[in-house]
Amino acid sequence: MDYQRIASDARQGLASVSIATTAIKNRALQAIADALGARRTELLKANAEDLRLAHENHLDAALLDRLELNDSRVEAMIEGVLQIEALPDPVGEMTRMTKRPSGIEVGLMRQPLGVIGIIYESRPNVTVDAAALCLKSGNACVLRGGSEAFHSNQAISDCIQVGLSEAGLPSSVVQVAPTADREFVGAMIGGDHPLCDVIIPRGGKGLIERISTDARVPVIKHLDGNCHVYVDREAHVERALAILENAKTHRYGVCNAAESFLIHADCAADILPALASVLASHGVEVRGCDRTCALMPDAHQATEEDWVTEYLGPIVAIKVVDSLDDAITHINRYGSHHTDAIVSENYTTVRRFLQAVDSASVIANASTRFADGFEYGLGAEIGISTDRIHARGPVGLEGLTNQKWIVFGDGQVRS
């Protein structure tokens, strides 16, 4: 495969889309949404072939669920594109304009990141989400989905190409890998001339670790979603129970589900017995410290490994702590810097928690399940970043841009 041709085409696509007007980009997005609706039958037929092969290869139920497309999921894909179309265009936005003593005016302007490579598994809807977000933010993209969704991704790619053509944009603005070979991933992230400027991996821990280790370009990623909810001594009990239940049981296999609860010792006797009944009704297994096990007789003894584990299932680790500082220390030591929450009626306690916990999202008196681009008002998201530089938390349109300094003068020269 001619990887350098793909890279060259991506650069040409970037040259066009990076300066495209908002109207042109929105026209392409509307045409993509229309094509998804018009080609629904072809999409579902391609997906049925992927599902047939997946069953033959004995993929597990969770993967099959993520792989499947149906009428409602196609409608959700269409709605996602239209939501991105409706979002403000970040490209060209100027901020912090300041007049300097010399008379020059200095500020910042948002610009696309460049050619973005996105490597993902299972979910074919990521193909259209990623393409739409990159397009609206003025980036070219190279998309490599999993082999299990190959036929679905090619059918979605056809819809994307229709949209680009109708808006007068080159097809190389969005390139979906024509192969599921691992060699293509290597070309995207490494070698003497990587295809992409930035890589965003979406998938299991193994995939993300491999990309992070081997990539020779910047990676926007998170490895784990080991999220916590801390219930403070001044928490409202009923509110705390509702938040704990939702954070753990709303959906298990997502990165913003809570995996550990920390309960202040002063309220543990009120919270834990009631929580035991709530979790039992959902079939959730508890792994707890000594004090937790004393108040929740059905709990299993927790090990050190439990404090760092992202279960992605009906298991939760619970620890009784003696203070706010103990909770903060535990979270910063064992957590994955993704999303952590506090339940407390004390404003000072909440402010200290928000400031001291080193995570991409820190939440007060609400479920960790709100750590999501749509819930934050970003529209669709490309993923959630736990990195400390550039983008952190849900990565939407703004996260797919950076800033450059701009200077306006009126003939000034420096003396």
Image: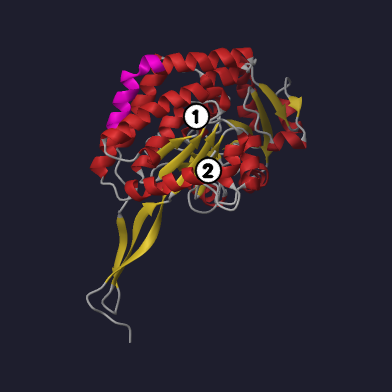
- Per the rendered image, the range of residues in magenta is 30-42
Q: Is residue 130 left or right of residue 170?
A: right
Residue 40 is situated, as x and y percent measured from the top left of the image, at 36, 17
Q: From this viewpoint, is residue 231 visible?
A: no
From the image, tell me which residue sits under label 1: 239
> At 46% from the left edge and 17% from the top edge, which residue is drawn?
46
Foreground residue, 330 or 265? Answer: 330
Of circles 2 and 1, the one toward us is: 2
> At 35% from the left edge and 23% from the top edge, which residue is drawn?
36
Q: Amino acid at mark 1?
A: Arg
Which quadrant is the C terminus positioned in? bottom left
Circle count:
2
Circle 1 — which element? helix
Residue 364 is situated, as x and y percent measured from the top left of the image, at 48, 40
> At 68% from the left edge and 31% from the top edge, which residue is drawn?
317
Q: Is residue 151 above or below residue 222?
A: above
Q: Is-magenta flag for residue 28? A: no
Foreground residue, 309 or 340? Answer: 309
Q: From this viewpoint, is residue 92 visible?
A: yes
Q: Is residue 271 above or below residue 175?
A: above
Question: Gap in Å between the C-alphas at discs 2 and 1?
Answer: 55 Å
**Disc ID at residue 3:** 2
Which quadrant is the N terminus positioned in? top right
Circle 2 — which element? helix
Q: What is the quadrant of residue 232 in the picture?
A: top right
Q: Is residue 47 left or right of residue 40?
A: right
